[in-house]
């Protein structure tokens, strides 16, 4: 029989706040992203709101190795202190039962790899960035893990590794996670937004609060 898998969203579920926003501010503070360029990026995002989650042009032209180094520093200094103790305890409880752990987030994989390593998670599905000649292009590679794409990517992972989604657990906080939660055997709404809370009550999903 295949292993049971527990799938965790990251931002506002395991971590207080939004990890990529923390990283954006970290880059500005470190001078790798100038205020002028940051403001230009905000203007561009405002003009194309539907594409704002896929737009990583603020990283365009930056050296991959430098960004990865700063992403790890940002994780250590700004993100790790925001990891929920209750969320961590939930991960450990699943691991104690022999369950595999998958992190599934729209944030950057470079930023969440240290979290995967610290938790001993089996898989990380996050936003992958295009690279060319050792620099980021500002575009993403593959599907962006948000909304229905989370379910598509998880289904690909389940086919590759042979686990059964009807036996899986999933934890998410946002209405965009509902596409995933309604397709999982054991959905849990964590720190839910008001829209997800309504849906959770409608479908009788458990609601939990990880102190953030």
Image (cartoon, rainbow, N blue to C red):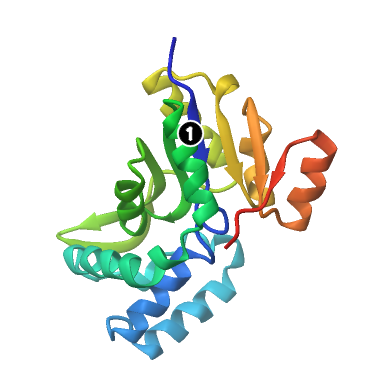
Residue name at image x 52 percent, y 33 percent: 152
Q: Which residue is mark 1?
A: 94
| Image position, residue 22 (x, y; %) | 44, 72
Inspect this view and state whether residue 144 appears.
no
Taking the image as shown, residue 176 lies to the left or right of residue 54, namely: right
Residue 165 sits in which quadrant? top right
Taking the image as shown, residue 104 lies to the left or right of residue 59, namely: right
Residue name at image x 77 percent, y 49 percent: 197
Is disc 1 placed on a helix, strand or loop? helix
In the rendered image of this protein, does residue 22 appear above or below residue 54? below
In the rendered image of this protein, does residue 179 appear above or below residue 85? above
Nearest the eye: 152 or 78: 78
Image quadrant in which the C terminus is located: bottom right
| Image position, residue 91 (x, y; %) | 47, 41
Nearest the eye: 178 or 128: 178
Taking the image as shown, residue 28 lies to the left or right of residue 151, namely: left
Residue name at image x 55 percent, y 35 percent: 151
Residue 103 sits in which quadrant? top left
């Amino acid at each position: 029989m295949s292993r049971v898998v527990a799938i965790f969203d990251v931002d506002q579920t395991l971590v207080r706040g939004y990890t990529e926003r923390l990283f954006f501010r970290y880059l500005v503070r470190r001078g790798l992203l100038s205020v002028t360029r940051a403001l230009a990026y905000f203007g561009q995002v405002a003009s194309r709101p539907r594409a704002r989650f896929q737009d990583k042009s603020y990283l365009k032209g930056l050296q991959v190795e430098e960004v990865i180094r700063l992403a790890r520093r940002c994780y250590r200094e700004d993100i790790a202190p925001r990891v929920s103790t209750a969320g961590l305890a939930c991960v450990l409880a699943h691991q104690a039962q022999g369950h595999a752990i998958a992190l599934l987030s729209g944030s950057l994989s470079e930023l969440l790899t240290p979290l995967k390593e610290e938790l001993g998670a089996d898989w990380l599905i996050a936003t992958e960035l295009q690279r060319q000649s050792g620099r980021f292009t500002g575009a993403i590679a593959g599907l962006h893990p948000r909304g229905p794409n989370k379910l598509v990517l998880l289904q690909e992972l389940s086919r590759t590794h042979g686990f059964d989604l009807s036996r899986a657990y999933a934890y998410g906080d946002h209405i965009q996670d509902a596409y995933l939660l309604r397709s999982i055997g054991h959905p849990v709404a964590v720190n839910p937004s008001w829209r997800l809370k309504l849906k959770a009550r409608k479908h009788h999903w458990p609601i939990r609060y990880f102190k953030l």
